[in-house]
Image: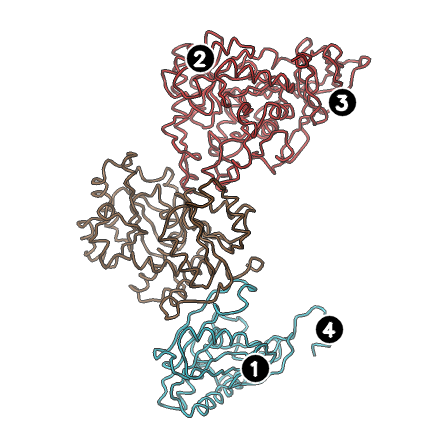
Chain colours: A brown, B red, C cyan
Amino acid sequence: MKHLLSTRDLTPGDAIRILDTAEEMAAVNDREVRKLPALRGRTVVNLFFEDSTRTRISFEAAAKRLSADVINFAAKGSSVSKGESLKDTAQTLEAIGADAVVIRHSAAGAPHRLAMTDWINAAVVNAGDGTHEHPTQALLDAFTLRRHLSKVAGTPSTGADLAGAHVVIVGDILHSRVARSNVWLLTTLGARVTLVAPPTLLPFGVEQWPCAVSYDLDEALADAPDAVMMLRVQAERMNASYFPSTAEYSRLWGLGDERFARFSEPELKDTVILHPGPMVRGLEISSVAADSDRSQVLRQVANGVSVRMAVLYLLMSAKESTR
Amino acid sequence: MTASNASPEAAPSYLLRGAALYGGERADLLIEAGRIAAVGAIAAPAGARVVDADGLVALPGLVDVHTHLREPGREDAETVETGSRAAALGGYTAVHAMANSNPVADTAGVVEQVHSLGRRAGWVDVRPVGAVTVGLAGEQLAEIGAMADSAARVRMFSDDGMCVHDPVLMRRALEYVKAFDGVVAQHAQEPRLTAGAQMNEGAVSAVLGLPGWPAVAEESIIARDVLLAQHVGSRLHVCHVSTAGSVEIIRWAKSRGINVTAEVTPHHLWLTDELVRSYDPVYKVNPPLRTQDDVEALRTALADGTIDVVGTDHAPHPSEHKECEWAQAAMGMTGLETALSVVQHTMVESGLLDWRAVARAMSEVPAHIGRAGDQGRPLAEGEPANLVLVDPAARWVVNPSVQATKGRNSPFAGRELPGRVVATFFRGHPTVLDGALNEPYPQPAVVTR
Amino acid sequence: MASAEADGEATRTAARAHAPSGRVVLSAADIDRALTRIAHEILEANKGPEDIVLLGIPRRGYPLAVRLARKLAAADPTVVAEQIVGQLDITMFRDDLSRQPTRSPSPTRLPSQGIDNKVVVLVDDVLYSGRTIRAALDALVDLGRPRIVRLAVLVDRGHRELPIRADHVGKNLPTSAAEKVRVRLTEIDGEGGDPEFTEDHVAIEAPRDEDSTEGEIQ
């Protein structure tokens, strides 16, 4: 593995290796000295063309805990905003000696361009590209879910896949890179996925994806999923007629108090709530649901560092010639 | 072999020995004073240069209904000179230069400028296309009559790059061009359905997360336009048809006797949206690459005549507009120097078209649509000597960096293609000989300028 | 993790019946005797079992540490084997990470009592350059502050590259640097491990060098 661009490229073995490595990284994060020397002398550049403090600090913490040098390159206010091309930026990073570039970009495929052209030799990690993918988010979701399922079953999580698990992903699938990465990864790991959304927020061609599709959240909940992942709904979608009003969206596809009350039914007693954040409380999820003990949101954030440590370690520890 | 730079009166004559006319019957062709002087078994007249055409196919010079030469305004992308050199190398003797230059070709002044640049270059007939609306803005008719009456004799009008989406304006344009025997060439793209669109809307766009350009955005405009053309009794040309659904609508329109012609690009006859998975913007084009089903439907339609012509939509761009993120990249592909080879590969070698039909789709009908009287003529005695010799057995690998076009954005780069243009004769003068550029058509008129 | 119970008398005679490739230098019985001796040395050096923690280095150091812990428990009834043994992964601390294909880390598990102020005995199968032990010492520092750190190895084959020596050695094994020392243990190489495994052993494999003649190997 030289780059992490998409979860579609991962075999079950690759995915489990990343999750297992993340388990060991998580153990380090529980220690007093939360630092490993594995990437000493290596340089990670966080190249963020889109603001995302959450993802950026997660990658930064991950790289630093592996003793890598971290350079944060925010495109805003830099030469990029003065019209510098991605190619020139990449070649600059190459000249600086970047061993890995963690890239967040509003254009789908920008990480592919970095990885596939001869502009730069560094390992490329996709930290979210347009409405394409966000592979480390899906990996941390899978990691969080795997730990939860192991805890319920009383079995070790290391080495396990997600066979038999059922995950419902709810919301704006059309514009969600998180949904795409999760569909490929969760199904690769053996889980069953159901997408729930208004038809306007499902991609054309979704019927060819390896998952079920439903317009009815209550029906999906009746199927007793192991996890329900709520996606953020951006209010500006309302103006583009994807749905008539936020109130109607919330009533039909939100996890409001009434719907959350069903989580006390016996079939849903172990069901957890995932959300990639940031949450829009009162729209796709109520505060009661978000703050409940079913919510894994903060665990997801903590696990994000472990998963990103694993990815950086696996991509960077060996020099290219031996990778 | 070289040609002299003498005046046309003293132009040398050429004897093309043993060419297969339209890929069939073999004959010698004698070219004298810009015309085909004789066809048959001919003894070489004194002073005539003999071109060994054994094994070569002779076709009338190709005519492109859809070329972007970029001049004036984007001379960094292409000029009339470089674009028409590329055309000659591709076997063309005439191109229709689209109006989306800067300034837009929406006045007699601009079309006459492009026309005279073409004459000065001397590689092909450069026939300017006039804009339908002022500035391609889709709000107000451009001075179609002035362009038609200008020295450029414009007969084809198009806002290509933009769709004439206002139905009233489209109706008026279709009506108005009747006064000049003109044709409206429509870039069929419903703008609201394609806001921000980046690629074909389908299974691949769903996975790649790129905003989709749905087939219905093309088909709904074509459906509307054929009905408008029928209603006002005018002539409609549909640019770069890209979907199976469009083919069905055009087939239906023709069955109703509607005066519509349709064009397909070489790239839509071969490439599909699967290539976009690379996110390499060399595959970014408008209309976008579609699916294999669409490719099959387009090939069938070109074979059965539903689609009349192949137009290159040659759209060169400077490298920096392609060496970037997909969404930021410009749309368009070069095509003049690969079109004939791609048609040979997709249509001739698959048995869908013979060379006679290629001559129709790439020369005769395009000339007729553009009302280019001296082009697309039969390979017969007394006709203007616009013709091309093709070696169908040759194989070559596309290398954009050695092409005559300034654009490096060929989607066929690195592919092996069949068929090589050995010679192009433009008004009896060889613009291409031995597969290489020769010299432009000598024009005394230019010297006096 | 497979049990170490199968070790010992029952399999003693099998060693030469199905000789593994290479020259066997320690049989299962030899290994068991060496571990018994090391266990007694550890108790002796520490004047009893107090504060002793055995940390095995993956992969084969860990089962050896478990076996040693059992032997300590056998020798001193106040010792509970499971409570004094752990595993110390050193992958992230290696100095050759960038020269090797990517390695997946193994878990680090410390006994519940931790390692602060303990007498930590690092356990590994083969002591060679000393670099693994250097990495283990670094890893240890990040986990706590032992009172004393000692080193027990089954085989010391020489060729040290760092100023490191073992406190307890099962067998000193002079080798050439071109030779390979192969340790096979039931817990790792038994069921599902090495398909040719029959019982515990240590063997020396001749270099697989194309230009060396057969005569030289002998």
Name the mark on residue B290: none
In this rendered view, identify the residue nearer to me: C32 or A173. A173
Name the mark on residue C213: 4
Percent from the top left, x then y, of residue A286? 21, 50
Binning the other alpha carbons within 10 Å of mark 1 as few (below 14), some (14 to 19) or many (20 upward) gives: many
Percent from the top left, x then y, of residue C85? 40, 80
Name the residue beneath numbered marker 2: B257
In this rendered view, identify the residue nearer to me: C34 or B371. B371
Q: Secondary structure at mark 1?
A: strand
Residue C149's image quarter?
bottom left
Binning the other alpha carbons within 10 Å of mark 3 as few (below 14), some (14 to 19) or many (20 upward) gives: few
**Mark toward the viewer: 2 or 3:** 3
| Distance of label 2 from label 3 (alpha carbons) | 49 Å
Q: Is residue B140 left or right of residue A39?
A: left
| Distance of label 2 from label 1 (alpha carbons) | 95 Å
Binning the other alpha carbons within 10 Å of mark 4 as few (below 14), some (14 to 19) or many (20 upward) gives: few
Name the residue beneath numbered marker 3: B2
Quarter occupied by the C terminus of chain B: top right
| Distance of label 4 from label 1 (alpha carbons) | 27 Å
Name the residue beneath numbered marker 1: C156
Instruction: Give the answer, above or below, for where B245 lies relative to A261.
Output: above
| Distance of label 4 from label 2 (alpha carbons) | 89 Å
**Mark toward the viewer: 3 or 4:** 3
Kind of residue at badge 4: Thr
Q: Is residue A206 left or right of residue C61?
A: left
2 and 3 marks in contact (CB < 8 Å): no
**Mark toward the viewer: 3 or 1:** 3
